Amino acid sequence: MKTISMSGSLRENVGKKGSKALRNQGQIPCVIYGGKEQIQFYTAEENFKELVYSPEVAFAEISVNGKVYRAILQDIQYHPVSDKIIHADFYELIEGRTIVMNIPIKVVGNSVGLLKGGKLSRSMRKLKVRALPENMPETITIDITDLDILQYVKVADVENEKYQLLDPKGATILLIKSTRNAVAEAPKK
């Protein structure tokens, strides 16, 4: 999985006034938790471009006052009007401990149903995955080559031994819908 490096500094003032002063300077107050202790730090807003505004999922390698923490972005808060990032929570990765992430779905192949004029309907764009950090996939690839019109892929069809999917097993991920110009197969005699 891709890793994005960030650097930050420990926060001295942890209250609302301190957070507001940091935001006015273009810095984002953050916290790393899940390890032995919580680390309150701040980092530049530019550090979030690759981590937040990208379709890919990535781990973060955060350097705070010389110590490096491996983490995932757990939660992010935005200003309700300006939509700027106002706070971020990171969850520290610990060896041997599973994590949960929303992993994007990548659809590959040219479906038989699409060639007949059907339409791909996606009801899910990401799947909730629990895995050890080293087994976490960057994407979940679904091959739709063999799907005909009115055939679908459910969460249970995508199971893998390296990770566990937390979405309901019967939930439909995608479906090849029939359209008006879909070519129906000739009836067999």
Image: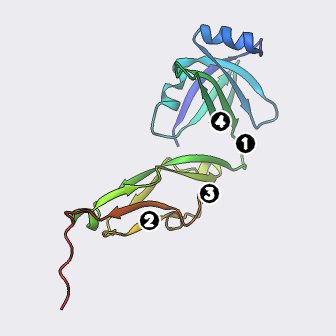
Residue depicted at x 41% and y 51%: 106
| Residue 144: quadrant of the picture | bottom left
Amino acid carrying label 3: it is Leu
Disc number placed over residue 94 in the picture, else none? 1
Q: Is residue 19 above or below residue 69?
A: above
Q: Secondary structure at mark 4?
A: strand
| Three-letter code for the amino acid on which mark 2 is drawn | Val
Pinpoint residue 174: horizontal percent, then vertical percent.
Answer: 42, 59
Q: Label 4, label 1: how many angstroms apart (C-alpha)?
A: 9 Å
Location of mark 2 (residue):
153
Label 3: which secondary element: loop
Residue at image point 54% right, 38% down: 58
The residue beneath circle 3 is: 166
Picture coordinates of residue 79 (x, y %)?
58, 21
Vertical order, 81 against 90 (above or below) = above
**N-term-proximal mark, 3 vs 2:** 2
Task: Tell whether label 3 touches label 1 (CB within 8 Å).
Answer: no
Label 4 and label 2: CA atoms lie apart by 32 Å
Real-space CA distance between mark 3 and mark 4, rounded to the nearest whole angstrom: 21 Å
Q: Dot 1 lies on which element?
A: loop
Neighbor class of circle 3 (other Cα within 10 Å; few <14, some 14-19, many 20+) is some
